[in-house]
């Protein structure tokens, strides 16, 4: 494949952009290395949280620093847009791939302005947990990002249905590659030793923020501790930088039986020690943490929010509870804690399910082909 740099033949460049550096390992681990080995010159741009430079270097990619805020900040967002335009003009990638709501919008606009082919990856819909003017602005942002992108990819089927249902995209406008997910999962080379073990705690992996349903989990955990004395909940993740998230973090820290682990770059030992994953989220795309847990033979207790219910097959790979129902969440967690045989069976089923449906190498092949098609079609024009 040749790059679109006039008459010269060069290694084609691909630029990935997300808002926060904390996201890059979950979204791109192994994939950037796969693309680099396939002949692409890979670059990553995002904010500096979580040491994305070290990650990029480990993947054979280049890191381009970017200042970007997750929440709407008009002046700073304009500066981010101008920075993205400069990056695209300097790098001149054959294609750009944008994920997360903020970079999905600003990146696709910058791509349109610089005539760079782009893919917008929809990982979830923040607007599902908002109302009023905020919901209107987020809806407008999604429509604009989809309109500016050359191609739009959703990470799950439920998420795609919701995009169409909310009239953010037209039928047929959003694609699913392979069976979806952000990055798939690589099955363990020796899973049996993990599938048979008896995990010691319930785990949560993700940002500490109200959207993840952690207030409901705190309420449920009080019930769990009364029924199952000694039960432990371990939370791996950092709090968002806002008052509500910090207050939630403080509440969890005071809840008996809860241990806050902070942000974890390597979650392998964390998953190995789990009895089950808890994900009482109010919204998801297709949660990679559920797939990662399943790769260790760990079942999930999840809400039936968009995306979360797609990742968990109720009463087969885990348990599903209504969004916001702390009582049902407590019942499900107690069921997992008190029933060794069922927890082990759910974990075994979860492993087999993700192995057949979300295998990382299959997803990477689908992504590589899609990227090549978009870049080649644009080059021929």
Image (cartoon, rainbow, N blue to C red):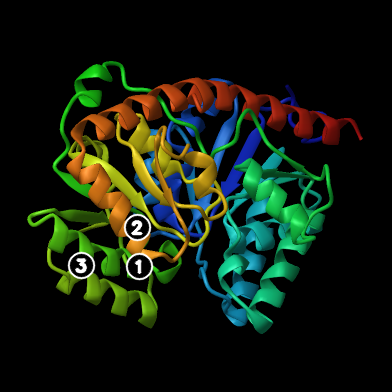
Q: Determine the residue positioned at 58% across, 32% down.
A: 41
Instruction: Tell me the crowding category of disc 3: few under 14, some 14 to 19, or many 20 or more residues within 10 angstroms, Cα based.
Output: some
Which mark is on residue 222? Answer: 3
Which badge, 1 or 2, is on the more N-terminal residue? 1
Which badge, 2 or 3, is on the more N-terminal residue? 3
* Image: 28 above or below 37: below
Residue 328 found in image quarter: bottom left
Quarter of the image for the C terminus: give it: top right
Q: What is the secondary structure assignment of the residue under circle 2?
A: helix
Between 373 and 326, the residue placed more toward the observer is: 326
* Image: 367 above or below 361: below
Q: Position of residue 139 (x, y in %)?
A: 71, 68
User: Furthest-right residue in view?
Assistant: 381
Q: CA distance from mark 1 to mark 3?
A: 10 Å
Q: Is residue 56 visible?
A: no
* Residue bearing mark 1: 216
| Dots 1, 2 in contact, CB < 8 A | yes
Q: Is residue 320 visible?
A: yes
Instruction: Tell me the crowding category of disc 2: few under 14, some 14 to 19, or many 20 or more residues within 10 angstroms, Cα based.
Output: many
- Tell me the mark number nearer the camera, choosing from 1 and 2: 2
Q: Position of residue 223 (x, y in %)?
A: 22, 65
Between 136 and 92, the residue placed more toward the observer is: 136
Quarter of the image for the N terminus: give it: top right
* Image: 96 above or below 137: above
Q: What is the secondary structure assignment of the residue under circle 1?
A: helix
Q: CA distance from mark 1 to mark 2?
A: 8 Å
* Residue bearing mark 2: 329
Q: CA distance from mark 2 to mark 3?
A: 11 Å
Q: What is the secondary structure assignment of the residue under circle 3?
A: helix
Q: Determine the residue positioned at 47% across, 28% down.
A: 33
Q: Determine the residue positioned at 39% across, 30% down.
A: 350
């Amino acid at each position: 494949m040749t790059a679109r740099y006039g008459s010269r033949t060069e290694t084609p460049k691909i630029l990935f952009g997300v808002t926060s550096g904390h996201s890059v390992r979950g979204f791109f681990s192994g994939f950037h290395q796969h693309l680099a080995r396939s002949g692409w010159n890979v670059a990553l741009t995002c904010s500096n949280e979580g040491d994305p430079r070290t990650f990029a270097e480990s993947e054979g990619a280049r890191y381009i620093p970017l200042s970007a805020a997750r929440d709407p900040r008009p002046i700073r967002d304009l500066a981010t847009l101008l920075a993205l335009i400069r990056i695209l003009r300097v790098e001149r990638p054959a294609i750009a791939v944008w994920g997360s709501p903020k970079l999905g919008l600003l990146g696709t606009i910058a791509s349109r302005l610089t005539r760079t082919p782009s893919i917008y990856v929809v990982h979830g819909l923040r607007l599902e947990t908002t109302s009023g003017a905020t919901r209107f602005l987020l809806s407008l942002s999604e429509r604009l990002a989809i309109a500016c992108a050359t191609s739009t990819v959703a990470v799950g089927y439920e998420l795609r249905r919701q995009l169409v249902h909310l009239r953010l995209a037209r039928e047929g406008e959003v694609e699913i590659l392979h069976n979806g997910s952000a990055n798939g999962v690589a099955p363990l080379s020796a899973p049996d030793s993990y599938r048979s073990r008896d995990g010691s705690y319930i785990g949560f992996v993700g940002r500490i923020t109200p959207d993840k349903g952690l207030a409901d989990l705190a309420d449920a955990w009080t019930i769990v501790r009364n029924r199952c004395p000694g039960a432990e909940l371990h939370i791996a993740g950092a709090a968002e930088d806002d008052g509500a998230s910090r207050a939630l973090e403080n509440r969890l820290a005071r809840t008996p039986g809860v241990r806050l682990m902070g942000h974890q770059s390597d979650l392998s030992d964390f998953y190995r020690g789990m009895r089950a994953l808890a994900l009482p989220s109010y919204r998801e795309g297709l949660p990679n943490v559920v797939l990662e847990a399943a790769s260790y033979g760990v079942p999930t207790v999840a809400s039936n929010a968009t995306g979360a219910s797609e990742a968990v097959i109720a009463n087969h790979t885990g348990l599903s509870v209504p969004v916001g129902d702390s009582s049902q969440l407590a019942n499900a967690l107690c069921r997992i804690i008190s029933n060794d045989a069922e927890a082990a069976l759910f974990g075994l089923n979860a492993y087999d399910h993700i192995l057949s449906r979300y295998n990382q190498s299959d997803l990477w092949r689908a992504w590589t082909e899609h990227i090549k098609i978009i870049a080649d079609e644009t080059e021929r024009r």
